[in-house]
Amino acid sequence: MQLPPQHLLQGLVKHYLIIDQKTSAQQYYRMFSDGNPGIVFHLKDPFLQWDEENLTAQRQPQSFVYGQLTHHNTIVANGNLNMIVVVLEPYALFTHFRTAAYELNDHTIPLEDLFGQEVRNLEEQLLTALKTDTAIDIIENFLLKHMPSQRHLSADFTMAMKLIYQHQGIISIGDLLKTLPTTERQLERKFREHIGTSPKRFADTIKFQHFLKLLQKQPHKKK
């Protein structure tokens, strides 16, 4: 289930993703980039982060910020799923967290490392919230209190983002540069700093997500 943010958080939060699923068996999930960073709040047991190279799993923090995924990621759930994902705008790490987005690629940071002891109180409030709307209100009050004013985004970067979304990612860098008053090198630098990936890779992600949504809308044929 997706829920929109209040208007004061537009530009930071894209939407809230509510995941609540009952299961008794261990489940493996393969995650792919949707072009957005985010904040995860586990309301039950956190996932295990699976390291395929070393064949080990590490427990995720109760709440954390994650950056762009540049490759697939495997997570393991040992029981019921109950979490809220604050899906951020692609550039939010740059504009609101005041960090170069590429520094968080394929990384997570415990929310407590960013905001200190107050996060413990936030997590406790969320664990005792009886309704989803109440939990969202708690999260939004926290974000409004702690997020600084938004960094400025240049007109050429903003237009590039708009064109990529308008074309569902099906646009070449050459076509972008025909419209924008910038060079390919400058555009690459801004996308890496603002989003964490190149404009081509970001467009490919948006294209993949567009086709995925189209497939999900296709009616299932009965055998």
Image (cartoon, rainbow, N blue to C red):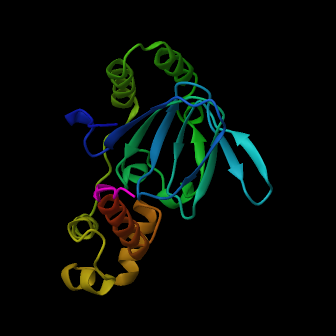
Image height check: is 213 above or below 27?
below
Image height check: is 16 above or below 128?
below
Numbered-mark total: 0
Q: Position of residue 114 (x, y in %)?
A: 54, 36
Question: As drawn, which residue projects farthest toward the front?
Answer: 223
Nearest the camera: 56 or 66? 56
Q: Which stretch is magenta?
A: 216-223
Does 197 sit left or right of 117 as displayed?
left
In terms of image quadrants, where is residue 168? bottom left
Q: Quadrant of the C terminus?
A: bottom left
Image height check: is 188 above or below 165?
below
Q: Residue at x 67, y 45 (%)?
A: 49
Please indicate, yes or no, whether residue 104 appears anywhere in the rendered image: yes
Residue 127 lies within the magenta run: no
Q: Position of residue 193 (x, y in %)?
A: 44, 63
In terms of image quadrants, where is residue 19? top left
Q: Residue at x 32, y 58 (%)?
A: 213
Q: Quadrant of the N terminus?
A: top left
Q: Residue at x 23, y 32 (%)?
A: 6
Does 183 sit left or right of 181 as displayed?
right
Nearest the camera: 103 or 67? 67
Please indicate, yes or no, whether residue 148 appears anywhere in the rendered image: no
Q: Position of residue 79 (x, y in %)?
A: 62, 30
Q: Main secondary structure of the magenta part?
A: loop
Q: Position of residue 68 (x, y in %)?
A: 49, 57
In terms of image quadrants, where is residue 7? top left
